[in-house]
Amino acid sequence: MQCVPLDNCGCVHNGRYLTVGQAVVDKACTSKCVCQASGVVNCEKLTCASGEVCGVRDGVRGCHVKQGQCSISQLGLLTSFDGMSGAMGAQGVFVVASLCDETNEMWFSVVMDARACSTVDTLYVFFKETAVTVNSQHVTWVNGRKVSLPSKVTSDISVHISEKTVIIEKASAVRLTYSLSKEVTVIIDSSLSGQMCGACGNYNNNSKDDMRTADGKITTDVSVVVGSWSARDFSRCGL
């Protein structure tokens, strides 16, 4: 044990030790407490701004910029970026979410293979520089080569596994999760709002236009929307 100057001593706050300068935010993001020198804790009221949401991101709780989230449950229930929800129903290979502008450097496309049943059996994630494939057993391939996880694919693309879930990330713009229970989540930065194509919708904060097929027709059936985003470059043999 080594003695340190009093000004370097940390703080004990709600039973948790904090180092000098360390901050902690409560679960509702209504207060932020900072450990100051000599064991003094200074707490201030906190309010998330418009366009922010309270939550944990990268292990840090606080007010974070809102992100778009689309999910497919293990029962085949799809919930779009804008909150439209319904049974996926259709079987096949479909584009879940894709940046519409293929010339954009941030372009990516998420394709799900649900040919065996109406749940995701294989997930394909395409970026401009690489492609990642994950099957339902979490066996993973990068550009056709089987890899062990975690894997640093490029300087800004990584694949790792956490709590029985494979996570594919590109910088802070795109985050894909695929669990052993076959649940898929696509999380994208709010800067991509209005630029999305695919079964997850266009992410324009308007759920009403999510019931639109790839060719622009309005429908009341989510399975028709999903079916319209068939990935044409995958074989349909056997369907």
Image (cartoon, grey):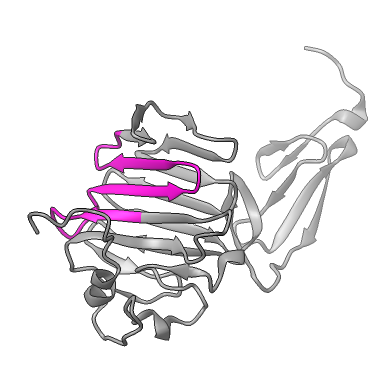
**The furthest residue to the top:** 1
Q: Is residue 30 left or right of residue 188?
A: right
**Is residue 66 visible to the viewer in this orientation of the structure?**
no
Image point (72%, 60%), residue name: 31
Q: Is residue 136 visible?
A: yes
Q: Residue at x 59, y 57 (%)?
A: 27
- x and y percentages locating residue 48 in the rendered image: 69, 67
**In the image, which residues are magenta?**
111-139
Query: Which residue does the image show at 59% across and 46% down from the upper left?
Result: 171
On whether residue 118 falls in the magenta region, the answer is yes
Q: Quadrant of residue 58?
A: top right
Q: Which residue lies at the image location 50% right of the left edge and 43% below the top edge?
A: 129
Specify the quadrant that holds the C terminus.
Answer: bottom left
Q: Horizontally, is 54 left or right of 226 in the view? A: right
Q: Is residue 101 left or right of residue 120?
A: right
Residue 220 horizontal/vertical position (percent): 26, 86
Please give left or right for residue 169 compared with residue 29 in the image: left
Q: Nearer the viewer, residue 165 or 140?
A: 140
Q: Residue 154's spot in the image, x, y percent? A: 54, 35
Please identify the quadrant where the N terminus is shown. Answer: top right
Kindly give the residue lying farthest to the left in the view shown: 238
